[in-house]
Amino acid sequence: MSESEPGTPSFEMTWSSTTSSGYCSQEDSDSELEQYFTARTSFIRKPHKDKDEQIDWEKPVLTQAEIEQKIKEYNSQINSNLFMTLNKDGSYTGFIKVQLKLIRPVSVPASKKAPSIQDAKKVPRSQAVKRRTSFYLPKDTVKHLHIISRTRASEVIEALLKKFTVVDNPRKFALFERVEKDDQVYLRKLSDEEQPLRLRLLAGPSEKVLSFVLKENETGEVNWDAFSMPELHNFLRILQREEEEHVRQILQKYARCRQKMQEALTTRTPG
């Protein structure tokens, strides 16, 4: 890996799986946009299977000597060539594995085939794309990223999207720290400035102690600025449709109650 300038993120990705088919056209057609979102989108929040509870997330600050010792210990515990390397400037490089657990489809530039690794390297994220194709990433896709200790969580997200030529706003996604403890799974969303490789070094190579997951950025507040105009119009249609369905169900409920009351009245005689 070539040396990186200070402050400049360094990325290299190895691919452990490929994108599958699962395409659905998403050009300028409202009906196609509707199919795109209604397949997986709902404004009614669903319970999460993974737990997000209070555990000790505090991380110690290591001295340079402690970092060197940690890297030696880390490399002695792995059974692959995914070693960490200490650089002359005090930084270090290594690999993190990210599991993509995305519920909704992602948007890529419209093409006749799924984006290959070569295509992903050719298309810049800044390129304006009007015609898009949406597809579901394979379930539990895993990617290995070769990064430097200064690489931030937000840069990891951008690198993953760039490799897939995903044109969705990076703010739609979040990187999570996943911990298994006492047969329970705990999740914590990383802030933009956190350094995933530092977390990997502190935790060691065990995936049960620490793993990284990319998910939709579903906080209590939706960042509507991250969506395009067609997406927002479609959300309004979905909202109206769900509202109409709830109203219909409530009216049916009270109509049934009213009918039962009227039936009870007709079977009774006054007095």
Image: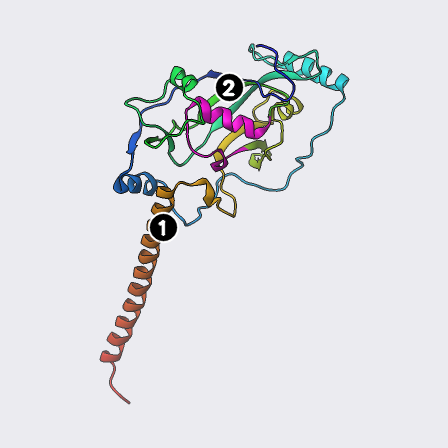
Q: Residue at x 43, y 27 (%)?
A: 140
Q: How far across and how far down the image is residue 172, in percent?
A: 47, 37
Residue 169 pos. (x, y %) = 46, 34
| Res 121 → quadrant | top left
- The answer to whether 223 is drawn above or below residue 191 in the figure is below
Q: Nearer the viewer, residue 172 or 270?
A: 172
Q: Amino acid at mark 2?
A: His
Q: CA distance from mark 1 to mark 2?
A: 38 Å
Query: Residue 211 versus residue 113: which sits nearer the camera?
Result: 113
In which quadrant of the rendered image does the N terminus lie?
A: top right
Give the magenta-colored segment's residue range. Answer: 152-175
Residue count near mark 1 (Cα–Cα under 10 Å), binned few <14, some 14–19, many ≥20: few
Q: The residue tagged with tag 2: helix, strand or loop?
A: strand
- Judging from the image, what secondary structure is the residue with disc 1 in? helix
Q: Which corner quadrant of the image does residue 240 belong to?
A: bottom left
- The residue where tag 2 is placed is 144
* 34 over 119 or under it: above or below: below
Specify whether 4 is left or right of 60: left
Look at mark 1 in the image and give the residue it sits on: 236
Amino acid type of the residue that numbered disc 1 sits on in the rendered structure: Leu
Horizontal side of 10 relative to 35 (left or right) equals right
The structure's colour scheme is rainbow
